[in-house]
Image: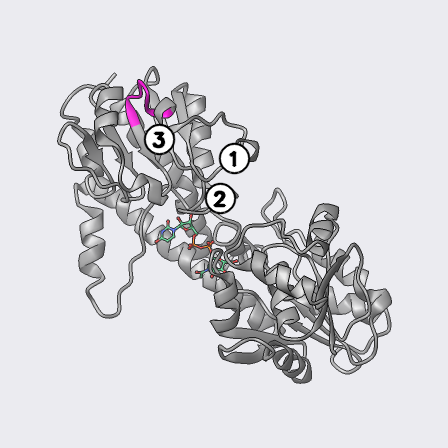
Amino acid sequence: MKRMCVVGLGYIGLPTAAMFAKAGWDVTGVDINTNAVEKLNRGEIHIEEVGLGELVKEVVAKSNLKAMLSPDFADCFVIAVPTPHNDDLTANLDYVIAATKSILPYLQKGNTIIVESTIPPRTIDDVVAPILIENNWIVGDDVYLSHCPERVLPGRILIELVENTRIVGGINKTSAEKAAEIYRAFVKGDILITSAISAEMSKLMENTYRDVNIALANELAKISEKLEINTLEVIELANRHPRVNLHLPGPGVGGHCLAVDPYFIIEKAPDESVLISNSRKINNSMPTFVVNQVKKLFNNRSKIAVLGLTYKGNIDDVRESPAMDVLEILKEEGYRLGIYDPHVKQEQVYFHLSTFDEAINDADCILVLTDHNEFKIMDEEKIINCMNNPVIFDTRNCVSITKSEIKYYNYGNLYEMNVPSYTHA
Ligand code: SAJ
C-alpha cells in the first residue's frame, strides 16, 4: 500500500487526507494542533464540512487514516498549511517553510512533494526548492516537487475535490506527471499539467478575477447612487448580453481567499498591478460607503440592528468579513448596536451578540450584511411592532418584504436615501 503524509489538517488538508485514504492510500495526517490530532485518531473531526465526519469515521476505522504531531516516512508528502498575510499584506510563508523543513528527515529518493497551500508566484522555485537543494536533494530527479492549488468551495469540498479540474504545476515535467498520477486516485475532473509558476499564478488570478469583477459591481453601485439609477436592474439587463457577467455589489469582499490572494500578486509586481490594487481599494471602501448611507438617514443617537457577520451567507466564517468593519465604524460613530447572526458563536467575535428579538427591539434601522437563508423572510409583524417607522437597508438584496409600513432600501434604490420620505430619529 502506498504511503502518504499530509501536513496541515485544516479545511483543505483534512478532506484531502480522507479522500486519499478512501482511495486506498495509507495516510498519516500531521498537525501541530493536539486537539485535531486526538480527535482524528478517535474518528472525529475538528472542523465543519458537509459529509466529512462520516468519511473520516469510515477511513479511520479501516486504519487507512491516522494523525500524528510530526511527519512520517511516505511516498508522497502533501503540504496544506495556511498562508496568512503579514501586517503589510505580504504573504507569510512561515508555515510553508516550517512544513517543508519538517519533512526533510523523512524524505527518501523517489518521493513526491506537493504544495497545496496558496502561495505567491515563484515561491516553489525561490523558497521551497532551495530548502530541498540545501539538503542535497536534486529536485525534479531525486525527489519530485509540484504546486497543486486547491479550488474547492466550502460546503462542497468533498464533491469539488473529485469533480473540479486540477492544475498540477511541476518544478519540471516529471514532477508534474508524478503528482498528476497521484491525484488520479480520486480526481474525476481533468488534470492539467503545467509549470509550478503558472499553477501559482493561475490560482491567484482565479480569485483576483472575482475580486476585480466585484469591485466593478461595487463601483457601479456608487455611480448609480449618484446618478439615481437602479444598479440591480442594470446588472440584470446587462447580463442578458451573451458575453457579459457583471457580479453583485455588496458591503465589501471577505473570506481568506478573495480578500487576501490579490495582495500576493501585488507584492511581487506592485507597479504593474494597478487594476488589481485599485479593485482591492474599491472593495475595502464598501463598509465606509454602507455606513455613509446609514448616516444619511439616522444620526448617531439611533439604534442599528445589524444582521449577519459572516463574509457570505449560510457559513460560520467571519475571517476578513466586511461586516466586522461596518460594525467597527458604526461603533466609532457612536451608534447604538444590536447584533444578530444565527451562524456565529459568541466566542468567535468580540462584539456582543443578541437574539433577533433583542437586536431589533427599539431599533431604528435593520442593516442586513449577510445573505443567510434565515434573513430572506422575516417576521414583518414583529418588525413593525418592535420598531418605530421601520427601515431595512439590505446590502445583499436578499430580504423579501411585503408590507408597505416597512421602508426597504437595497442597492436598487440607494439614491432614495438622499431624500428620505420621513425623518428618522
Ligand atoms: N461576493 C460579492 N459579490 C459577488 C460574489 C461574491 O460581493 O457577486 C463576495 C461574497 O459575499 C464574499 C466574497 O465575495 O464576501 C468571497 O466569496 P466567494 O463565494 O466569491 O468565494 P470564497 O472566498 O468563499 O471562495 C473562493 C472560490 N474562488 C472562486 O470562486 C474563484 C473558491 O473556489 C476557492 O477555492 C476559494 O476562494 C479559495 O480557497 O481560494
The one nearer the camera, 224 or 75, is 75
Label 3 secondary element: helix
Label 2 secondary element: loop
Residue 37 seen anywhere in this rendered image of the structure: yes
The quarter of the picture where the N terminus appears is bottom right
Of the two numbered discs 3 and 2 on the same chain, state the one appearing first in sequence: 3
Name the amino acid, label 1.
Lys
The one nearer the camera, 226 or 136, is 136
Q: Is residue 360 magenta?
A: yes
The one nearer the camera, 161 or 322, is 161
Residues under numbered marks 2 and 1 in contact, where contact means CB atoms less than 8 Å apart: yes
Q: Whole-percent x and y of residue 30? A: 74, 58
- Residue labelled 3 has its Cβ within 8 Å of some atom of ligand 1: no
Q: Which of the numbered marks, if any, corresponds to residue 316?
A: 2
Measured in 3D between alpha carbons, the distance from the residue under mark 3 to the one under mark 1, in whole angstroms, is 25 Å
The quarter of the picture where the C terminus appears is top left
Dot 3 crowding, Cα within 10 Å, few <14, some 14–19, many 20+? some
Query: What residue is disc 3 on?
Result: 291
Of the two numbered discs 3 and 1 on the same chain, state the one appearing first in sequence: 3
Query: What residue is disc 1 on?
Result: 345
Determine the residue positioned at 74% across, 69% down.
Answer: 129
Dot 1 crowding, Cα within 10 Å, few <14, some 14–19, many 20+? few
Determine the residue positioned at 68% across, 62% down.
Answer: 60
Q: Is residue 206 magenta?
A: no
Q: Whole-percent x and y of residue 265? A: 54, 59
Q: Which segment is the magenta one?
A: 359-365
Label 1 secondary element: loop
Measured in 3D between alpha carbons, the distance from the residue under mark 3 to the one under mark 2, in whole angstroms, is 23 Å
Determine the residue positioned at 47% across, 72% down.
Answer: 163
